[in-house]
Amino acid sequence: MRKFDNAVFLINPNRFPGYSRKLKKILNIYGTSHVVECDKPEEFRKEVEAFAAGSKQFLLIWGGDGTANFAINAYMSASGRTLTKTKALGFLRGGSGNGIQDSYEVPVTIRAQVRSYLEGMEQGFIQPVDLIRVDDGRTSVYCQLLGIGLDAKVLEYREGAGGGRPGILNYIFASLRSWYKDFYPLRGLKKLQMEEGKYAFKGPRSNAEFPFDSFTRETRSPLIEIATRPYYAKMFKIAPDVVCNSGFMDIYSFNFLYRRELLFNIFDIWNGWHRRINRHQAKRGRPVIERYEVKRVAFSMSKPFSYHVDGELRYCDTADADGQCTLKCTIVPSAVNFLVPDSFYRKFHPF
């Protein structure tokens, strides 16, 4: 059997076509028999459904975070009732934002990625991971990272003025606009109703925790992240303490009071150095970055709001009887298997 005979490669050709052509040449050298290009969402979905119903074990996806999220949701929809423990998904770096690939230590070069996944298939480097099920009152989707506030506004500006084009400059301009224009408007009152979890503060010298069955927190945080993976976009370690298979989702509430606080701390936020930020904030008597580990959370506001799932912009605009727009998130433990590199796998299986 050829090494890739048990795998399907699914390519989004709209993302960096030059690199995808290089990938296809490399796969041809390895004698890969099943490589599919899909430039329409419905075609992509049908290929994922065919994989879920077929005999092949591995689905390797070329694309960015949006492509990865679409594939995960198509797979969960197709196989949710009869999920097999032997099938696994893997993700190659094919987008301007590769947060899911960064989170699972996927190598940078195309050749290294192919070799890494070959080894993973041969050695059985399969890791069950948790997903977050998100319900906004209209639709339900799965993701590993959800953002509310400033980062969702960045995506709004990027998709509006930038037409959704990739590129770091486009992202920087959208970020500056969001920081300047929306920081204070986004400090409106929000409610987090959390269940089965704990407050889990991480500091440079001391940590603090308290468990709860149910806890309601009202906040004016301009940025809230809910995650089961650490990285977002391009090496942005927005959720540094998450564990992909803990059975809990992490909630980070960035309680900055002023625009300048966010600006002065952006380098530390990018690198996931929340403990250093909290040390300075605590010394000044300012609110810290709050962190929670929970199984369920309902996020409510008195007006519609935007949010993103794995970098895909969405809107919560369905009000309940009390006039609240509510986003409900539930952890789904070990929801899907990922094919992962050796370096990642051995951290979870050291013995």
Image (tube, rainbow, N blue to C red):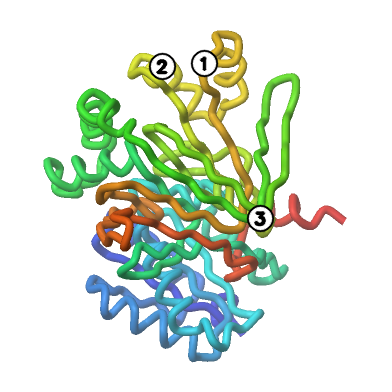
Q: Is residue 63 or residue 292 the one in the foreground?
A: 292
> Is residue 178 positioned above or below 2 on the image?
above
At 58% from the left edge and 60% from the top edge, which residue is drawn? 115
Label 1 – label 3 distance at C-alpha: 28 Å
Q: Residue under circle 1?
A: 286
Q: Residue furthest right?
A: 351
Label 2: how many residues lie within 10 Å, few (<14), some (14-19) or many (20+)? few
Can you tell which of label 1 and label 2 is closer to the viewer?
1
Label 1: how many residues lie within 10 Å, few (<14), some (14-19) or many (20+)? few
Image location (x, y in percent) of residue 272: 54, 31
Q: Is residue 142 or residue 257 the one in the foreground?
A: 257
Q: Is residue 8 or residue 26 the one in the foreground?
A: 8
Instruction: Confirm or deny contact between disc 3 and disc 2 (CB under 8 A).
Output: no
At 49% from the left edge and 90% from the top edge, which residue is drawn? 53
Label 1 – label 2 distance at C-alpha: 10 Å
Image location (x, y in percent) of residue 197: 66, 50
> Is residue 258 positioned above or below 283 on the image?
below
Image location (x, y in percent) of residue 214: 62, 52
Q: Is residue 212 or residue 321 the one in the foreground?
A: 321
Query: What element does badge 2 sit on?
Result: helix
At 32% from the left edge and 54% from the top edge, which residue is drawn? 324
Which image quarter is the C terminus in? bottom right
Query: What element does badge 1 sit on?
Result: loop
Instruction: Confirm or deny contact between disc 1 and disc 3 (CB under 8 A).
Output: no
User: In this view of the protein, can residue 298 be seen by the observer?
Assistant: yes
> Is residue 336 positioned above or below 111 on the image?
below
Q: Residue under circle 2?
A: 261
Which image quarter is the N terminus in? bottom right
